[in-house]
Image (cartoon, grey):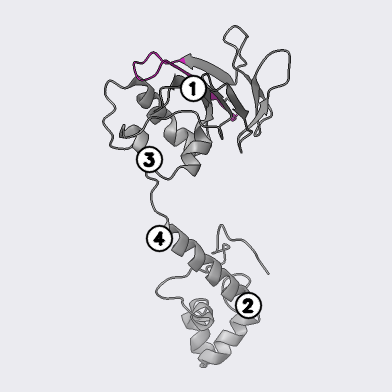
Amino acid sequence: MSSDLTDPSGGDGFAVGDRIKTYEDYLDSQISDDDLYFLEDQDLAREMVELGFRGRGNALKREDFEFRKRAAETLKKAKTNQAPQVLASEGKDLANFPFLQALAAREKLVREGRLAVIVFIRDFNSKGQEVSGYIDYGHRLKTEKKFDQYFERKAKLLPKPTDLSYYNWDTQTLKSNSSPNFEVIADNTNGLQFKSKRDRKTIVVDPHAPQTDKTVRREIQTHEYCQVVIFDHTTHRRT
């Protein structure tokens, strides 16, 4: 039995539509006017098609037809129900907010998996404590349902103890966690580093260390935070 879900037609004339809804409809579509003229019996003509004596190419068996019909209907339903992707940054007024503009410019690429981004932020939390840390932008986009609150400036994107790295300068609290996209490499002589779980390449965050051709370090000049650095890591091959 064929399991081709990407092309349910299989190149043998089968396509779910208004005309072909049953196996009998499929057999009828393979019968020519000449077949009906000479055989003078539609049931016999259908049987001849099913046995391979009439029709165009190798006729599908009933179970193959039903399988491909279900596959085609599933694909059609999936396309119908597939909602267009809504970006958290879409339609937001980000004028005069360079950091939010930088996040918005990367959101679609990150959501599609074409770009992995680590964001370093140093700023003050609501308690007036200085905090800093490295954030897996893609992971936060995926896990925070109300990420648009940052683009609406109702809340400030700040490092959390659950992020790749978090440090509270007042309480001396230090936390680090690997994410679905990055592995934290903390115990090494070169300082904190991250390894992409997709291509196993290392992201060096030391501004004085040489960067690889896969990672670009960009410091964002903005009034929104004390310091912001974005590390863009591409995992696809360059053409």
- What is the spatial separation of the Cα atoms under label 2 and label 3, in whole angstroms? 43 Å
CA distance for labels 1 and 2: 63 Å
- Of the numbered discs 2 and 4, the one sitting upstream in the chain is 2
Q: Position of residue 172 (x, y in %)?
A: 57, 21
* Numbered label attached to residue 87: 3
The foreground one among 124 and 190 is: 124
Q: Residue furthest top?
A: 208
Quadrant where the image shows the N terminus: bottom right
Mark 4 vs mark 3, CA separation in Å: 20 Å
Give the mark toward the camera: 4 or 3.
3
Of label 4 and label 1, which has the lower sequence position?
4
Which one is in front, 182 or 226? 226
Residue type marked 2: Glu
Q: Nearer the viewer, mark 1 or mark 3?
A: 1
Residue receiving disc 4: 80
User: Which residue is located at x 56 percent, y 85 percent?
Assistant: 46
Residue drawn at the location 49% of the way across and 68% of the way down: 73
Q: CA distance from mark 2 to mark 4?
A: 26 Å
Q: Earlier in the sequence, mark 1 or mark 3?
A: 3
